[in-house]
Amino acid sequence: MAFDDNMAKDSNNGESLRRLLEYTAAYEMSTGSPMLAYVHSFGCQQNVSDGEKLMGKLAKAGFGFTDEPEKARLIILNTCAVRENAEDRVYGILGRYKKLKENDPQLVIGVCGCMAQQQCAADRIKNSFRYVDLVFGTFVTDRIYDMLWKVISGRLDNRKERVFDLSDSDTTIHEDLVQMRRDKVKAFVPIMYGCNNFCTYCIVPYVRGRERSRTPEAVIEEVKGLVASGYKEITLLGQNVNSYSYGFAGLLRKINEIDGDFWVRFMSSHPKDAGRELIDTIIDCDKICTHLHLPVQAGSDRILKAMNRRYTVNDYMKIVDYARGRDKEFSFTTDIIVGFPGESYEEFCMTKELIRKVRYDNIYSFVYSKRTGTKAAEFEDNIPDSEKGQWLRELLLEQRETSQEWLSRYVGKTLRVLADGAGKTDGTLTGKSYENIIVNFSGGEQDVGRFVDVKITCARNWALEGEIVK
Ligand code: SAH
Ligand code: SF4
Ligand code: F3S
């Protein structure tokens, strides 16, 4: 077996992995096809990356994968808890799986990720979704073989075993986790886990624990491997990459020295920690894309303070102005929350004013969602939902008006674009430019996964259009 080396590393899991392998192999022998797993990740790229690691582990235990839950013998929902609607969606999906379980009692259903890390969610699943076999949080993915084998071996002995593991004591970064990446061109590389910032609205620090960084050696080795196997875009991930323990600018410079034709992106940057050094580094390093995802959240200093963001609008604008004053074209994108407890309409209008001033190429905006356990959950939430929805629409309208005009600065220029895949109409492709702008252009299959030069002919609301230059 090709797994022997790694099995030794999975010390506590070794026996369970062996058993699982026997189990999946026996299934494959008798049915002629591999035992299929369906893994669905919700939420941010960090979670998607965790999902890929989980799939790598499952592949090592002999599972194949399907995109159709109906065909799976193992279903795992890798969940997000950042807003209430993210959780509601998971409960909705779990409700629909009841039928699947009735049809196939051997089916194993698991829930993991940020939502599963919360005791209240785990309790609700325990009591109201009794057909869910397995619930585990964000710290214990490396124990998947033990947890899964416990459930399956219980079945084989006619015992109903349910496993719940929310422990958060093991904060070791497991570098040996094999990863199953679906995309062959773009890869996510986490450089750190957790968050120390405790923005008052945010659940992430509670479900992901304190910050811990991978070593630069581990990150660089992974990036080198990806580049060698043909990856063209590497996105470094962290809730706040600027607090990477070993120095983020230094890491970028080292990655930039790796040979090969590839781009590097990263997210997110916390405005309180993103400064001139970061901008200077991006400008010096050709492989680092000139784009900053710099979540501002709100345009009023009072609300920023209540959110515990630890910067002012003025501090924020200093970074933007510094980047915009340089001789490379920078693109900014952001996250915005509307309707934070106590926010007045006047304060909300300051956010609109800010997006006009910054001229973002794209914004991700959310209605505030109360998260139990966070500081802001104790604040009085006095704004009716209907009003928050109205504010969100106003904000998007504002952005649409600003962005089309702002994107037109690219018309007539030639941008380097990484072609992602087929566009909306026949004979077109879509991709993202070095600056992170979506570009639609005419092109064929042969260009997918390649860098192409595109001359921009037209600016739309969120995207550019152009022609490949030969
Ligand atoms: N670490 C990243 C953000 C991770 S969460 C950062 O600090 O930029 C992604 C986005 O979700 C946040 O930027 C915020 O805009 C939004 N968000 C987080 N908690 C939220 C809540 N309780 N309600 C609404 N939006 C929220
Ligand atoms: Fe949440 Fe703030 Fe941490 Fe981002 S920096 S994950 S918004 S607490
Ligand atoms: Fe990401 Fe959602 Fe967790 S945004 S860190 S998956 S709460």
Image (cartoon, grey):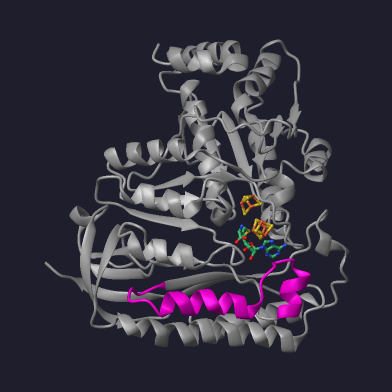
Q: Position of residue 88 (x, y in %)?
A: 71, 54
- Count of picture labels: 0
As drawn, 295 above or below 230: below
The answer to whether residue 433 shows anywhere in this view is no
In-image side of 454 versus 379 (left or right) = left
Quadrant assignment for the N terminus: top left
Magenta-highlighted residues: 301-330
Q: Quadrant of ligand 2?
A: bottom right
Q: Is residue 388 magenta?
A: no
Q: Considering depth in this image, is 437 or 89 the residue closer to the camera?
A: 437
Q: Is residue 322 magenta?
A: yes
Q: Which residue is drawn at the image coordinates 73% and 35% (left, top)?
A: 168
In-image side of 388 versus 408 (left or right) = right
Q: Position of residue 455 (x, y in %)?
A: 21, 75
Q: Considering depth in this image, is 245 or 373 the residue closer to the camera?
A: 245
Q: Which residue is drawn at the image coordinates 51% and 50% (left, top)?
A: 247
As drawn, 362 above or below 246: below
Q: Considering depth in this image, is 87 or 304 the residue closer to the camera?
A: 304
Toward which corner of the image does residue 369 lie, by quadrant? bottom right
As drawn, 172 above or below 299: above
In-image side of 17 versus 368 (left or right) = left
Toward which corner of the image does residue 374 lie, by quadrant? bottom right
Going by the picture, which residue comes out furthest to the left? 470
The answer to whether residue 132 shows anywhere in this view is yes
Quadrant assignment for the C terminus: bottom left
Q: Which residue is drawn at the image coordinates 53% and 72% (left, top)?
A: 363
As drawn, 8 above or below 410: above
Q: Which residue is drawn at the image coordinates 34% and 62% (left, top)?
A: 284
Q: Position of residue 35 (x, y in %)?
A: 49, 24
Toward which corner of the image does residue 82 lie, by quadrant? bottom right
Q: Position of residue 257 (x, y in %)?
A: 31, 48
| Majority secondary structure of magenta residues | helix
